[in-house]
Structure formats: structure tokens, C-alpha cells
């Protein structure tokens, strides 16, 4: 019985020739990640350990991104705690205001994540790096602390679901629509404890930014990780961004999958997840009544990359955000921010009546920079629409692609770009 | 080791945002987090919960964000055990790692109602509904997880094994 791509990476990092689903292993870690919410808890746990040193100052990444620039005194205290820890342990990859970005956009951009890696992060969307062919998964703060000290983590080897992607998506269909379609199909626990392996000739028709978006939301189907094969586009991305050596793993031909699905990308439509679960999806043509929105958020670790901003700008160019709608654009990293400025995208956003924020997770998790009041509704390119996720318990979040969020900002209701003649 | 208490019952997909909303994540103090535990799904929870009480839920409990603040808040609120049909995987790891016992048992999740008096024997995995006079066999922990729980968390376990 062969191994899946994920199983091969885990076996190699556990020093084993072979692993199988359900097996408990201890794997060597290439990177341990934390942010300003989860790292203080991990640092506190580390204080209780008899061994106080980090396993490697180069293989830990601490990214201040959730509540910074600090939203209040308590957040400032959290960041101060992490800043002092980073200084004390001489952590190479500590990112604060000025260098930071949203962690899951930042780390691949900085070349810290490459194919073949095993990465844990105290943030559920750590699964993003599967786009590059790495095994990466979210953990909690105690696992992060243990990882920082030992350089190892225990895993139960996951079984996998195979998603065979075929065809080419149409103009306004992106990675977000692919993953929302999949979550709508299998449910928010459809991949619980399992890998989601994306394969097929359709992968070549997805940009790297599309793939980051898809892998990013594997957790919203309960997945342990999402992973893509390493093709020319992935290699080109890594060669542009990283000096680290990468290793390509491929699933065995006789690898066993729990389930297999074939998805024709050419048949997908823009897809929107209604409150209060990412699985409550409707295609744009299934929405028959006006869904009026108060806010549109374009950003996050899911959709704050340059492709996302270009797409939104293409729609917002020479148009105006509807009266009564707040449109908030959040480039995910400083480099993306700068690139958006150089390409003239920021000018387009501002002229359209949108605001542009410094990189932050802010509104996605109801932190700051766009909190909703009672009864308000937001179309958002973020990843979760749980009760109270973006503010008041009686507010609503609708998840969608940057194209839908931008078009909806202009019309004031959930809309496709086609409604604008695009 | 046993847990015994009154049950608070919830449905499917209880996410970590409702267990502890992100607006309170500017704190990592367990006692402070506990005061907001379950607030967005059950405002009365924190006023009614007593030390030793048990949470029972249906599928995918603890889905969403990886925040360890969620099991920390539940534990600090006095809850002795969480039983569910299934758990989201990060929540599962986090609970074990901080020493909050949690057990998967679909039959118990169906056969226990809010307010029932329930006893859980962690050594045998047997869950007894004392109110209804029924019992269920919960999933037993593998050996190394039992060691983590008996050490009251991963940190102590690592300290003991290094």
C-alpha cells in the first residue's frame, strides 16, 4: 500500500521508511510559528519548562499581526512580551510593525516555507503552506512551546481525501470559489483529521495565490492540512522568494484515499458562504433576493495577496463604493502594500471611496479595523462567518472572493462583476 | 480519576469564537477568560456553571481558530470534562496539552441531555448518565496521551521525560 504526499513528508521527518494512517509519530520540525495572540500563551508555558532554550533561533517565526499596530493596552502588553522573548532568544525571524505582514502571506513571501517542510504554527490557518508542497498544520500554544524547545511535534498520521481538479476556471472564478465550493460539498467537518490533497491538470490553471487561498481554508473543512503537488509555478515561486533548498514529494501511484472527488473548475461559479458556517454556500446565481451589505472587507491571510488586490482594483477602477457601504482593503504584507502602490492599485481603491489599512488580521476575527454593529452585514474575503466573528453576535458575515466583495461594494448588495457589465 | 457533574448541552460545530470571542483575546489570564466562556452562544453559562460540571455536544466541537484560550477558558470555568460526538482536531490537541480531559462518544452525545448528572471514569472510558441510569463506552486514550493527562499537560510531561 503506497503513501500519500503528506504521509511521505511525515515519514521522512520521523526517520521512517513508511508510515500509515492512524500511526502516532514524532516528527522533526522545519519551522515553528506563532503570532501576537498565541505566542504569549506559549511563552508562558515555556517558562514552566525545565529546558528554557529554543531548539533553533532560525527555525522559529514570530509574527505580530492580529492586533497590531496595538489596538489597546492589553494587546500592547502581549506584543511587548513577544518582543522581549524574541530579543532574549535572538530569534532571527521576528516581524514587528514595519516588517510584519499577515503571517500566512508573509512567511512564503520571505522564503521561510518551502516544499517538503514540516511546519507547525499556533494559528489554524498555518495549513496555507501546503500550496508549496509542504506539510503544515495549525496547533495550539502549548504545542508551539514544546516545538520551540524540542524542535519536534507528535502527529497522528492522517488519511487523505483526493480532489482531482480538471479544467480552467472562468474569468471571475478564483481559488476562493474553488475552496468554498468544496467546503459546501463536504461540510465543515468533511475532512476532519484528514489531509486534503489537490491534484490534476486543473492545478496548473490556478495561480500560486489561488493555491494559497485553497490550502488556507482546508481547516474550514476540518482538514489537518491541504497540499498541492510541486509544479513549475511552485518552483518558480520558491526560487523567487527563498534561498532554502526544497524537496519534492509525490504521492505513490497506489496511495490509498478515503474518498476521491473530481471538480471541473470550468463549471464553477462565484460562490458565497452565508452565515454562520463556511459550508452554507450558494452560487451567485442561486441568490435570488437582494442581500444588502453595510461593509466589504478585502484582505486577510485568505485573500490579501497581490492577485486579490489586482482583481478588486479591476472592478473598483473608475467606479464608486455605494453610499452606505464601508469598503476596507487590507494588503496582507508590506511588500504587497508597496507593490499595490507602485501598480496604482491603492489610488484606484481610494478614488473609489475605499480605505486602505496597514497589514493586520484586524476585522477578520472581530479584533478591530472594521467591527460590525448589531444587525450589520459584511461581504468579506476572510475565512470564517461564525456567530459574532466580526463583531456583534447579531451581525452577519458572508464569505466570498475579492471579485464578489469588490462588485458588492459598488452595488451595495451581493453582486457578481457581470452586474457591472464586466 | 473520575469527573462528576451537571451537564451543559450544545449542538453541532460549536466554534472557538463562541467559546471565547476574539475581542477578549487581548488577555491570556485563565480566570479572566473564564468570565467570558461560551458568552456568545449561552450568556447564562458562566453564571450557572459549578466546579466539576460537564459539557456535552454533538459533532465537530471546538472548530475554527487554534486559540488555546478556548480550552483554557472552559477548564478555568470549572468544567471537568467535555464529551462530544467528534472534536475539531486542534481543539482536541490543545485540550489534552493543557490537561482538560475530553472524550469522543457519539452514543453519549445523543443519550445525555442538559441538566443530567453524569460521571466519567477516565481509566475505563465509561460514561454514566446517573439521571437516566444509562452508560456508554467512551474512546479510551492511547498510552502516551494518558501520560500527558496524568502529568496534567504536555509541559509537565516534557519536564518529567527530559
Image (cartoon, grey):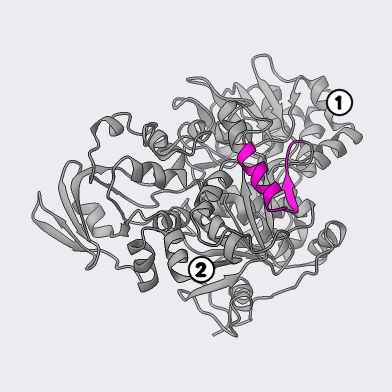
Give the camera-side residue of A296 and A49: A49
The chain that hosts pointer 2 is A
Observer-nearest of A14 and A18: A14
Cα–Cα span, label 1 and label 2: 47 Å
Quadrant housing the C terminus of chain A: top right
**Image spot of residue A23 (x, y percent):** 47, 76
Secondary structure beneath disc 1?
helix
Q: Quadrant of residue A287?
A: top right
The residue at 35%/62% (across/down) is B149
Q: Quadrant of the N terminus of chain A?
A: bottom right
Q: Which residue is mark 2?
A: A155
Image: A256 above or below A45: below
Q: For residue A371, what is the image quadrant?
A: top right
Q: Residues within 10 Å of mark 1 (few under 14, many from 20)?
A: some
Residue A23 visible: yes
The stretch in magenta equals A79-97
Where residue A103 sits: x, y (%)? 68, 47
Residue closer to the observer: A392 or A83: A83
Q: Is residue A93 magenta?
A: yes
Classify mark 2: residues with Cα within 10 Å, few (<14), some (14-19) or many (20+): some
Tally of marks: 2
Q: Is A216 one of the magenta-colored residues?
A: no
Percent x, y for residue A326? 66, 20
Q: Which residue is at the far top?
A: A323
When the figure is inspected, residue A116 is found, relative to residue A357, above or below; the finding is below
Determine the secondary structure under disc 2: strand
Residue A236 horizontal side relative to residue A226, left or right: right
Which residue appears at 80% of the width and 26% of the height? A349
Residue that badge 1 annotates: A347
Q: Is residue A4 left or right of residue A63?
A: left
What chain does mark 1 sit on? Answer: A
Amino acid at each position: 500500500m503506497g503513501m500519500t504526499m503528506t504521509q511521505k513528508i511525515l515519514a521522512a521527518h520521523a526517520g521512517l521508511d513508511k508510515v500509515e494512517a492512524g500511526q502516532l509519530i514524532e516528527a522533526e520540525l522545519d519551522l515553528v510559528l506563532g503570532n501576537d495572540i498565541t505566542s504569549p500563551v506559549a511563552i508562558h508555558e515555556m517558562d514552566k519548562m525545565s529546558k528554557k532554550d529554543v531548539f533553533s533561533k532560525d527555525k522559529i517565526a514570530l509574527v505580530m499581526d492580529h492586533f497590531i499596530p496595538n489596538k489597546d493596552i492589553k494587546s500592547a502588553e502581549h506584543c511587548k512580551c513577544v518582543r522581549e522573548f524574541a530579543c532574549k532568544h535572538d530569534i532571527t525571524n521576528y516581524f514587528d510593525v514595519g516588517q510584519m505582514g499577515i503571517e500566512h502571506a508573509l512567511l512564503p513571501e520571505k522564503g521561510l516555507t518551502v516544499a517538503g517542510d514540516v511546519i507547525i504554527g499556533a494559528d489554524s490557518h498555518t495549513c496555507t503552506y501546503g500550496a508549496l508542497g509542504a506539510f503544515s498544520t495549525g496547533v495550539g500554544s502549548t504545542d508551539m512551546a514544546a516545538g520551540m524547545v524540542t524542535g519536534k511535534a507528535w502527529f497522528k498520521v492522517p488519511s487523505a481525501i483526493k480532489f482531482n481538479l480538471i479544467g480552467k476556471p472562468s474569468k471571475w472564478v478564483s481559488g476562493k470559489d474553488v475552496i468554498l465550493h468544496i467546503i459546501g460539498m463536504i461540510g465543515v467537518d468533511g475532512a476532519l483529521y484528514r489531509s486534503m490533497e489537490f491534484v490534476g491538470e486543473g492545478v496548473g490553471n490556478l495561480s500560486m495565490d489561488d493555491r494559497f487561498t485553497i490550502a488556507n481554508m482546508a481547516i474550514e473543512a476540518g482538514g489537518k492540512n491541504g497540499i498541492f503537488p510541486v509544479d513549475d509555478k511552485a518552483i518558480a515561486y520558491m526560487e523567487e522568494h527563498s534561498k532554502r533548498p526544497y524537496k519534492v514529494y509525490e504521492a505513490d501511484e497506489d496511495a490509498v484515499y478515503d474518498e476521491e472527488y473530481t471538480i471541473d473548475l470550468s463549471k464553477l461559479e462565484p460562490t458565497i458562504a452565508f452565515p454562520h458556517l463556511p459550508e452554507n454556500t450558494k452560487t451567485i446565481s442561486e441568490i435570488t433576493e437582494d442581500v444588502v451589505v453595510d461593509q466589504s472587507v478585502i484582505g486577510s491571510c485568505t485573500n490579501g495577496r497581490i492577485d486579490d488586490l489586482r482583481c478588486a482594483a479591476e472592478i473598483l477602477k473608475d467606479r464608486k463604493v455605494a453610499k452606505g457601504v464601508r469598503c476596507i482593503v487590507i494588503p496582507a504584507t508590506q511588500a504587497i502594500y508597496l507593490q499595490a502602490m507602485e501598480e496604482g492599485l491603492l489610488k484606484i481603491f481610494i478614488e473609489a471611496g475605499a480605505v486602505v489599512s496597514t497589514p493586520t488580521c484586524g476585522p477578520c476575527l472581530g479584533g478591530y479595523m472594521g467591527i460590525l454593529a448589531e444587525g450589520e452585514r459584511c461581504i468579506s474575503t476572510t475565512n470564517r462567518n461564525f456567530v459574532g466573528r466580526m463583531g456583534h453576535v447579531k451581525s452577519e458575515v458572508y464569505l466570498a472572493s475579492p471579485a464578489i466583495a469588490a462588485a458588492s461594494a459598488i452595488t451595495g448588495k451581493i453582486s457578481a462583476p457581470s452586474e457591472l457589465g464586466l | 480519576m473520575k469527573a462528576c457533574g451537571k451537564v451543559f448541552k450544545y449542538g453541532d460545530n460549536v466554534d472557538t469564537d463562541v467559546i471565547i470571542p476574539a475581542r477578549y483575546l487581548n488577555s491570556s489570564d485563565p480566570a479572566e477568560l473564564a468570565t467570558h466562556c461560551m458568552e456568545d452562544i449561552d450568556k447564562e453559562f458562566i453564571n450557572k456553571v459549578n466546579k466539576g460540571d460537564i459539557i456535552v455536544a454533538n459533532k465537530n466541537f471546538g472548530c475554527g481558530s487554534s486559540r488555546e484560550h478556548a480550552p483554557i477558558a472552559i477548564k478555568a470555568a470549572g468544567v471537568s470534562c467535555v464529551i462530544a460526538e467528534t472534536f475539531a482536531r486542534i481543539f482536541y490537541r490543545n485540550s489534552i496539552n493543557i490537561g482538560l480531559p475530553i472524550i469522543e462518544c457519539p452514543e453519549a452525545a445523543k443519550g445525555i441531555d442538559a441538566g443530567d448528572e453524569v460521571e466519567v471514569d477516565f481509566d475505563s472510558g465509561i460514561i454514566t448518565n446517573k439521571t437516566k441510569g444509562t452508560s456508554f463506552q467512551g474512546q479510551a486514550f492511547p498510552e502516551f496521551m494518558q501520560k500527558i493527562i496524568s502529568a496534567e499537560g504536555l509541559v509537565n510531561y516534557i519536564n518529567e521525560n527530559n
